[in-house]
Image (cartoon, rainbow, N blue to C red):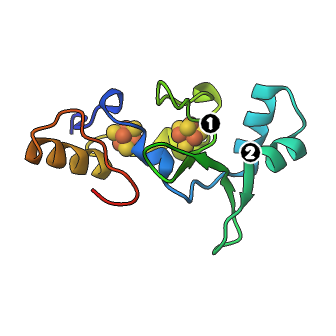
Amino acid sequence: MSRQYNCDKCPAYCCSYGRIVVTKRDIKRLARHFSIDPSLAEKKFTKTGSKTGERVLRHREDEHFLTICRFIDPETRNCTVYSARPKICREFPGEGRCGYYDFLTFERRAQEDPEWIATTDGL
Ligand code: SF4
Ligand code: SF4
């Protein structure tokens, strides 16, 4: 199935998801990227997920969504650690469709506004 989404036309909706799980390997990759110790990278870039106890990426405040991954560039909406991003980010959403983008496309068409962006506090 060919790719039905375009990340260049999306404000990085998926990066606002609160549970972006990282593995030890992901933390090591980030540590290498920043030339810091893995234990420091774990502390700086991740936190313990509130429900599951797993390590998840830390967030920061965002103008569109309440919060977003700390590695998003707020101007370009691109990932600032693209070459060192976690495995889960590399795999999402896979080939084919992206649910977030489908929603965005639907609303942009319905509202006749190609620039429309969803916000966390409503539509
Ligand atoms: S939500 Fe979907 S379309 Fe938007 S950046 Fe993420 S993968 Fe790309
Ligand atoms: S690491 Fe990059 S791709 Fe992954 S959630 Fe953060 S900004 Fe998005």
To which quarter of the image does residue 19 belong? bottom right
Q: Is residue 28 above or below residue 77?
A: below
Tell me where residue 105 appears, x and y as whole percent.
19, 43
Q: Which mark is residue 45?
A: 2
| Residue 87 seen | yes
Secondary structure type for disc 2: helix
Looking at the rendered image, the quarter that the C terminus falls into is bottom left
Q: Residues within 10 Å of mark 2 (few under 14, many from 20)?
A: some
Q: Which residue appears farthest toward the bottom when viewing the image?
A: 51
Give the distance between the C-alpha atoms of the residues marked 2 and 1, in whole angstroms: 9 Å
Asked whether, in this view, residue 84 is left or right of residue 102, the answer is: right
Question: Which amino acid is tagged 1?
Answer: Phe
Tell me where residue 36 appears, x and y as whole percent.
87, 32
Q: Give the residue at mark 1.
A: 71
**Front in this rendered view, residue 51 or 3:** 51
Secondary structure type for disc 1: loop
Asked whether, in this view, residue 54 is left or right of residue 17, the answer is: right
Contact, mark 2 vs mark 1 (Cβ under 8 Å): yes
Query: Which residue is at 55% across, 29% downward?
Result: 73
Asked whether, in this view, residue 11 is left or right of residue 88, the answer is: left
Question: Which amino acid is tagged 2?
Answer: Phe
| Residue 94 seen | no
Looking at the rendered image, the quarter that the N terminus falls into is top left
Query: Which residue is at 47% across, 42% downward?
Result: 63
To which quarter of the image does residue 116 belong? top left
Tell me where residue 21 appears, x and y as whole percent.
61, 55
Query: Which residue is at 49% across, 28% downward?
Result: 78
Nearer-N-terminus badge (2/1): 2
Ligand 2: give its quadrant: top right
Query: Ligand 2 near label 1 (Cβ, under 8 Å)?
Result: yes
